[in-house]
Image (tube, helix red, strand yellow):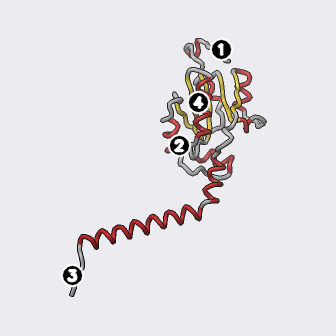
């Protein structure tokens, strides 16, 4: 565990970052596990442009909404805008002791992670096996017909209910 220093006023500062698109249990687990490693959790949420630059596709949920969703989580003490993956300037500014990442980043180079390995600790957290944003997107694609059919059926049922209600209030007059 990282040492507490006078620079961070006696607390262990943990930093994590991510896309946090289609917020799910795996995201909550990362935030909970990250918070458990220290006293103060800073979460950097990637901008739409940053995500598109390395994933090749923009997120479903826009940045302004994703950052609000993350900020509403009880484990999070501070939320930052992330325009550079694991930005060294942010790590220095907030005197971060520990950076957490998903285990899928373990063998990937990030300047901020290499810097953090020399100036603090890096902890790789396992993914929640039952869920990921990619698996949710694939499930939505696979179930598109069901979703469209159910939505259309609801719309038709609502329209029929409105017509029946209108007819019951204004009975037809027999000629």
Q: Nearer the viewer, mark 4 or mark 2?
A: 4
Residue 92, image quadrant:
top right
The Cα atoms of the two marked residues, 2 and 1, are separated by 32 Å
Name the residue carrying label 3: 173
Name the residue carrying label 4: 32
What residue is at 61 percent from the left and 51 percent from the top? 58
Image location of residue 4, percent across then percent down: 62, 14
| In this view, 102 is above or below 154 | above
What residue is at 68 percent from the left and 48 percent from the top? 55
Hey, which residue is sitting farthest right in the picture? 107
Q: Of the residues under marks 1 and 3, which one precedes in the sequence?
A: 1
Name the residue carrying label 2: 66
Q: Nearer the viewer, mark 1 or mark 4?
A: 4
Hey, which residue is sitting farthest front in the picture? 174
Q: Of the residues under marks 4 and 2, which one precedes in the sequence?
A: 4
Tell me if 161 is positioned left or right of 6 in this view.
left
Residue 42, label in figure:
none
The Cα atoms of the two marked residues, 3 and 4, are separated by 66 Å
Question: Callout 3: 10 Å neighbours few (<14), some, many (20+)?
Answer: few
The Cα atoms of the two marked residues, 2 and 3, are separated by 56 Å
Image location of residue 33, percent across then percent down: 62, 29
Name the residue carrying label 1: 3
């Amino acid at each position: 565990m990282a040492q507490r220093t006078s620079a961070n006023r006696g607390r262990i500062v943990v930093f994590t970052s991510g896309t946090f698109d289609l917020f799910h249990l795996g995201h909550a687990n990362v935030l909970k596990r990250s918070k458990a490693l220290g006293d103060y959790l800073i979460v950097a949420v990637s901008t739409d442009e940053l995500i598109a630059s390395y994933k090749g596709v923009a997120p479903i949920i826009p940045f302004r909404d994703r950052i609000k969703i993350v900020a509403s989580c009880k484990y999070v003490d501070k939320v930052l805008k992330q325009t550079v993956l694991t930005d060294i300037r942010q790590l220095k500014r907030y005197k971060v002791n520990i950076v957490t990442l998903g285990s899928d980043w373990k063998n990937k180079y990030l300047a901020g992670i290499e810097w953090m390995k020399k100036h603090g600790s890096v902890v790789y957290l396992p993914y929640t096996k039952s869920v990921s944003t990619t698996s949710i997107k694939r499930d939505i694609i696979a179930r598109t017909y069901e979703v469209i059919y159910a939505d259309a059926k609801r719309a038709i049922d609502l329209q029929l209910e409105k017509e029946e209600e209108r007819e019951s209030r204004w009975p037809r007059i027999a000629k």
